[in-house]
Amino acid sequence: MPPSRQPIQDGTSYTAASNQVTAQLNASGDSSACEFGTWHTHVQVLNGMYQRKWVYEAMPQGNPASGAPNVSYSYVDINYTVQVIEDKEYASYCSGLYQPQQLAIYSDSTLGGLGISGTFTTSAVGYERRTWLEATDTESNCQTTTNGIIGKQPGGYNTAFDTSASLASHIADILNQAHTSCDKFNPNIVEY
């Protein structure tokens, strides 16, 4: 029977950075009066899966060499799809808007870490809206599916190094790789 997957409830997130973004948007932007105009919208999603892999030493150990080779290290192989749409919209809004992206992580770990395998999915789309800036804004649509590596550990897998305390670092690695895949992906608006 495969292990059950439960959403990870604890760990830190990008909340501090996203709160700064929220404050900047609320204080910096658009008029409080409603108007029909040109707006810049940013929408992003991130979904994927992962599985821990083991890398073995080339030769068995001992004299004479016998048995299975030792585990050299393990890592987490991730496969994810990231999509970011930057659009020019003609509409009537009263102000800009910020909605953080919510990322749900499902893991087979009992300690709140990544465990051996799991998935991550966008449970609420990341969305930002502000007035269009003719001098700098462009429309774009980036969608890519790719693999990456995170969470290397020397030797065999050790659950003591894979807990809720280390989860934020692993999620940051995923978000930074997503940003590399689609440069308009904004890790600062992701909460989990």
Image (tube, helix red, strand yellow):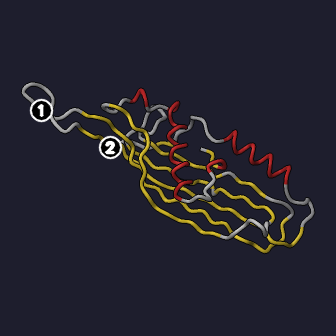
Q: Quadrant of residue 92?
A: bottom right
Q: Give the residue at x 59% y 44%.
A: 192
Tag 1 secondary structure: loop
Q: Position of residue 119 (x, y in %)?
A: 46, 49
Q: How far apart are the alpha carbons under marks 1 and 2?
A: 20 Å
**Rendered view: 190 above or below 33:** above
Q: Quadrant of the N terminus?
A: top left
Q: Which mark is residue 189?
A: none
Q: Position of residue 101 (x, y in %)?
A: 64, 52
Q: Earlier in the sequence, mark 1 or mark 2?
A: 2
**Rendered view: 71 above or below 149:** above
**Rendered view: 120 above or below 90:** above
Q: Give the residue at x 93% y 63%.
A: 33
Q: Which mark is residue 67?
A: 1
Please state which of residues 117 and 6 is positioned toward the viewer in this rendering: 117
Q: Position of residue 118 (x, y in %)?
A: 43, 46
Identify the residue position indicated by label 2 in the image.
53
Q: Left or right of 176: which side holds 25?
A: right
Q: Left or right of 6: which side holds 189?
A: right
| Residue occupying the far right of the picture | 33
Q: Give the residue at x 61% y 49%.
A: 187
Q: Are marks 1 and 2 in contact (CB under 8 Å)?
A: no
Q: Position of residue 52 (x, y in %)?
A: 36, 43
Disc 1: CA contacts within 10 A as few (<14), some (14-19) or many (>=20): few
Q: Amino acid at mark 1?
A: Gly
Q: Quadrant of residue 70?
A: top left
Q: Amino acid at mark 2?
A: Lys
Tag 2 secondary structure: strand
Q: Quadrant of residue 13?
A: top right
Q: Give the residue at x 51% y 37%.
A: 167
